Amino acid sequence: MEYQINGDEPKIIGKKCGGLYLIQQQEGESVTDPANTIFLKFDSVWSKLCFDGDTIFWRHEVPSEPVNHNIGICLALLNLCELDGVVGSDLNKIQYSGNGEVVSAEFNFSSGKSLKFIHNCYEDFTAINC
């Protein structure tokens, strides 16, 4: 177990997911960081999940459209509030893991669907598997 959690994990186990947003980093026509920041909504409360190195950060924050100053490299807000098996399903558990090179947070839902966010500590990007 090589990871740290900064902030308090929200009390969301057993609650229904009401929303999901991602902020992606784009460079030109390529997505270089698919899940730079994750926003999850449970009981009308938004929680922000993000990674830096081997640290997993939890904060209470409402998603907002990022402001960009450069068209070549920018951040984009994705609304995934209609993602089947996640939004509208209860969260059964969250599992964290780390090995020095990557850290991850996996969300398992009552629908059988899981979302896994995998952060590469050295290349500083977060992939998503669902």
Image (cartoon, grey):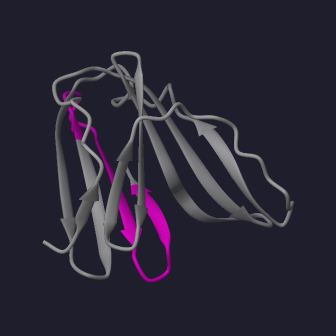
Residue depicted at 29% across the width and 62% down the height = 104
What residue range appears in magenta?
Answer: 108-128
Q: Nearer the viewer, residue 116 or 120?
A: 120
Q: Nearer the viewer, residue 129 or 106?
A: 106
Residue depicted at 53% across the width and 57% down the height = 36
Q: What percent of the width, then of the height, locates residue 54?
A: 32, 72
Residue depicted at 50% across the width and 26% down the height = 81
Q: Nearer the viewer, residue 130 or 120?
A: 120
Residue depicted at 53% across the width and 33% down the height = 80
Vertical placement of residue 52 versus 111, above or below: below
Q: What percent of the width, then of the height, locates residue 58?
A: 35, 47
Q: Nearer the viewer, residue 53 or 25?
A: 53
Instruction: Answer with the quarter of the image where residue 88 lies.
Output: top left
Q: Is residue 27 magenta?
A: no
Q: Which image quarter is the N terminus in?
A: bottom left
The image shows a total of numbered marks equal to: 0
